[in-house]
Image (cartoon, grey):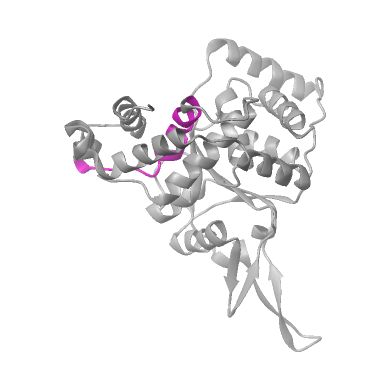
Amino acid sequence: MTIKAVQQLQTYLESQVIGQSDLVKQLLVALLADGHILVEGPPGLAKTRAVKSLADCIEGDFHRIQFTPDLLPADLTGTDIFRQETGEFSFQPGPIFNSLLLADEINRAPAKVQAAILEAMAEKQITAGKNTYKLPELFLVMATQNPIEQEGTYPLPEAQLDRFLLHLDVSYPNAESELEILRLNRGEAKGEHAVSPPTLTQQDIFTARQDVLNIHMADSIEQYIIRLVMATRQPEEYDQTLSQWIELGVSPRATIALDRCARAHAWLSGRDFVSPEDVQAMAFPVLRHRLLLSYQAQAEGVHPNQVVNHLLSLVGSA
């Protein structure tokens, strides 16, 4: 029942976010693997629409925050407010206490705000004053950022990037999809073709997550994941080019993320076991934002996808 409900959700999202089937699948992988998502791409590619469409289908409170340079941590977490009638301070929760949080253009917020959301993403709690408050059991941050416009932005620190389970890279749709987008937009403007979104309860999601954890993973696949991770930390043992490109390898969070995401990818594909192809499919969104490239690689314009692709060609699955 759960897999059928998730497949219906996938079909619905693909009808709302046209030409981005890979983005839709990876959004569902992140939901099933219980992790946060960073969606990056040029303006106008339905990043926010994809996240909002997913939120429409999930039982739980949803809130969108437009991150700006003047945003304060209290605008996100909430703050203690003095109640004159009682003569005491009481905590007023902020928008971060919703189950689903869309952090739009997250790289526009200053360091103090990034620190506040970092605690929430890492520990599912926030600290206000002297007190610590737990966040909802279902808590998912879906952030977007625009890589083109850099004026008035603050690059996300490596520690925060590491907290994102997946980094989703969105590119332009093809001509056929562009035509479908045009017709969909025209139909929505006329009020036509309104499709009711399917709804997943929180219990559906928790059950699906348990099913994902029960997917069989052979020892050889586990060893494959470990070899990929270790190759980023000891690239000189594999290839001179890889060694010149990578300044710092990925953390154990990448190992855990690759395991969870490969399982979710296999489950979405209708299988009860993980294959090397599942690991390879998820290597790009799991590793690309965790690799710290050398100055030489950046000077040569090497993209993290190139590094991951080269890594997969060097490290065999057998």
Write down the region rendered in magenta. Answer: 277-295
| Residue at x 57% of width, y 47% of height | 35
Locate the N terminus and report the quarter of the image it occupies: top right
The answer to which quarter of the image holds residue 183 is top right
Compared with 267, 249 (above or below) is below
| Residue at x 40% of width, y 46% of height | 151
Q: Magenta span: helix, strand or loop, mainly?
A: helix
The answer to which quarter of the image holds residue 47 is top right
Residue 267 percent location from the top left of the image: 63, 31
Compared with 235, 116 (above or below) is below
Residue 80 percent location from the top left of the image: 66, 77
Q: Residue furthest front?
A: 219
| Residue at x 46% of width, y 27% of height | 276
Q: Nearer the viewer, residue 287 or 90?
A: 287
Q: Residue furthest bottom?
A: 87
Residue 23 percent location from the top left of the image: 56, 29
| 92 horizontally vs 284: left or right | right
Locate the C terminus and report the quarter of the image it occupies: top left
Compared with 112, 48 (above or below) is above
Residue 132 falls inside the magenta stretch = no
Residue 237 percent location from the top left of the image: 20, 38
| 194 horizontally vs 266: left or right | right
**Residue 313 appears in the rendering:** yes
Residue 279 falls inside the magenta stretch = yes
Q: Residue furthest top?
A: 176
**Residue 71 appears in the rendering:** no
